[in-house]
Image (cartoon, coloured by chain):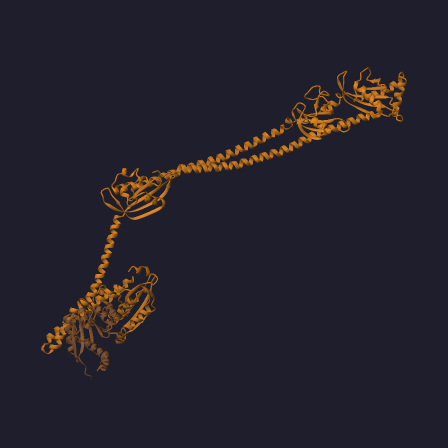
Chain colours: A orange, B brown
Amino acid sequence: MNLSPISDRDDQTGLLAARGFLLIFSFLAAGLVTVGYLSYKNYEQQYRTETVHQLSAIAELKVGELSRYRNARLGDGNVFYKNPAFFRLVHRFFEQPADADAQRQLLGWLGRLSQYGQYDRVWLLDAQGVTRLSVPGGQQPSASATVQLVSDVLRSGRTTFQDFYRNEKDRRVYLALMVPILDEPDTNRPLGVLVLRIDPSAYLYPFIQRWPVPSETAETLLVRREGNEAVFLNDLRFTTNAALNLHISLESTNTPAVMAVLGTDGIVEGRDYRGSPVIAAVHPIPDSPWFMVARQNTAEMLAPLQARLWQTVVVIGALLFGTAAGLGLIRRQQRVQFYRERAKSAEMLSASEFRYRRFFEATQDGVLILDAGTGMIIDVNPFLIKLLGYTHEVFLGKKIWELSFFRDVVANQDHFAELQQKEYIRYEDMALETSDGRRIEVEFTSHVYQVHHQTVIQCSVRDISARKKAERNLNETMDELRASNRDLEQFAYVASHDLQEPLRMVSSYMQLIDRRYKDRLDQDARDFIAYAVDGAVRMQNLIDSLLEYSRLQSRKKPFAAVNLTKVFGQALLDLEGRILETGAQITAGSLPVVRGDAVQLGRVFQNLIGNALKFRGEKTPEVRVEAEEFSTHWKITVRDNGIGIEPEHQKKLFKIFQRLHSRAEYPGTGIGLAVCKRIIERHGGETGVESVHGMEKGVPSGSPFRKKEDNHGRLQSN
Amino acid sequence: MAVYRAIEILLVEDNPGDVRLTQEALKENKIRNNLHVAKDGVEAMKFVRQINGFESAPRPDLILLDLNLPKKDGREVLAEIKTDEKLRSIPVVILTTSDAEDDVARSYDMHANCYVRKPIDLNRFIEVVKVIENFWLSIVELPRTENR
């Protein structure tokens, strides 16, 4: 049988520990991931806000700049609009084209404009749209759109901004400001039109395209609405020749440019003209058909976010790894400790198993191990095999109820069920049959317990034949003793009756002879008769004493509290006659209450005091009764001033029928002190005698009583 | 002094020595008596009930009863007499060898009128018999006188 249930249970413990660690790790991991996630989310939000803010700031800056640019250009126009001096000069020049001075003055005006750098060309057109003057010089054909617009301006008399347009002659994009030349009082009749053409590539385009921070994808662009399309007004970073050529249908509402022209003002996300995901700030530019789109690829814009995400993931990952490693290390440490302890306990267990095995093999009880489920015998110890005289093979592989010699204990499966159900069973007075047909008496006990997930029943078989035999012997002896006691009682009774009758015959008829034939008898005959009668009388006294002695046992009463002072008083009453006769002084100290038989204790006092009166010598008797307390008992002393007892005689003193004096001196049978001794012994005490010679001659008789509270248990067994 | 008829005494005693001793003791007394002897309890009961050969037996004035008897012992005899309406008025004196307390107590329980231990000294025995007679006289005097 294997008593080392180490692996399974301990593996389970290990598994539990591992689960614990996993749990701790899960908590820590969840915490870390949450912290990482929140930190990232926080950063993302902050970053997005910042980025969008930056984008907006750039966009707004540019919007403001463009707005100011337009206003500056209109301001330029206003210099000439309804300017009487300029009007007169133009009028003079138109009237007299040959007026060199006027021409020179006009060229001065226009040249300053051109020089100022904002206008690549300035024309002066007359009311028929014919170019009259151009700075710089030389013929430069106007775009058809310009020509068209000139007539509108001439008609309306208002300064007009010609938006981005393409000059079909040189394929370039321009803007133009057209200022009607009006004399203030006569507003309806423009003299001509001043056309200030702007080449956006000189200033506007670079300005628009400029991005304050380095960026791979960021760009600013202008769009305007043309029918159902949004038209890009400047050249773009990622497509060539886009200005005025790139149109996007307004249906592509996903495109920031479209959103802008449709009235959105703010930050949008969408896809740009290339289809790339972008984030854009879109704003209308006040007093213009333009819309500003400042956009950047989402990917680029969020790249730092991506980086941050990765960074966070890496940090959290590292922390998780660190945590796992730390926990793993602790776990490993624990496992090492665990295995160390396990190894130690395995060693101890192995020692324990060795001890168990030794015990199993050496014990002087038969041991049988059963499988609790099936009743199959798993193991049997050598003692049981030897005790019953069967071989090992008889037991193994059998079910317990299949062993015929166990039938008194486990006759069948139902009996076995009882063993299974009760954790502990003890049968006494069972008999087992040995191989040679003897029946031995055994005590059978069974315990149910678990070993290695297997429930077993351990049955112990103890050979109690010897004990049983001893018990029987003891019972027989007790019975004999009881019978003997009964016989003794019977004997005492018979003695008192039947032995006395012949005695009475002897003495009575002797006396009758003496009475009737006195005259015919001589003195000798009468003496002989007297001796015979005296012998018979003494015989009767002896028989009476013997009877009394034997009755100490048969007439005993159960113990109760006895007040020795009362007992003492009663004894004095019983002895009253002799006390008066002798004039004795009998006193007592303080006497205790003890447990005992009041009648018998009274007898002790009566006998001891009676003895003192009897063996009184010459003096008037003085008797003193005293009690002395000890831890477990009382010592009661009856001290007198009588004749005393020589030390060499003291041993005989308490023996039955022992006398120290002749009957002539002191009559009696010698039963008194023997009775006292027997009574005191029955009370668990001792009797003794001390002689004190000297000042006071006395015969103290010690009779220690057990204390009232102490002697209860002891005396019950008497 | 009043003249009495002889007292009819039944002595129930199996020991001839005791019977004779009783007779001798009675001889020494002045009161006339007829002593009848029954040797066992069965005979004693026949006598007191005047049956089976004792039809002509007189009704005893006094029964001296030994306790240890053959066949039916004194205790049974006492019990029968004291439970019989006709017989219970007969005084019964228990004569016994022992002063065993059990015997004494039981005898009185069964309404024995007197209990006397047979003394070993003849002179004391004679005194005892005298005491018994006096005892009887104290009991019987008045009723007997009336009857006359």
The image position of residue A2, as x and y in percent, is: 35, 38
Left or right: residue A129 versus residue A672 is right
Left or right: residue A140 versus residue A606 is right
Vertical placement of A121 versus A319: above or below? above
- In this view, the residue in front, A327 or A702, is A327
- In this view, the residue in front, A291 or A189, is A189
Query: Looking at the rendering, which quadrant does residue A341 occupy?
Result: top left
Query: Looking at the rendering, which quadrant does residue B77 occupy?
Result: bottom left
The quarter in which the N terminus of chain A is drawn is top left
Vertical placement of A381 versus A689: above or below? above
The image position of residue A624, as x and y in percent, is: 30, 70
Vertical placement of B67 versus A288: above or below? below
* Residue A110 visible somewhere in the drawing: yes
Vertical placement of A550 versus A316: above or below? below
The image position of residue A346, as x and y in percent, is: 38, 38
- In this view, the residue in front, A112 or B81, is B81
Farthest-out residue, bottom: B1
The image position of residue A345, as x and y in percent, is: 39, 39
Q: What residue do we see at 57% from left, 32% from top?
A: A315
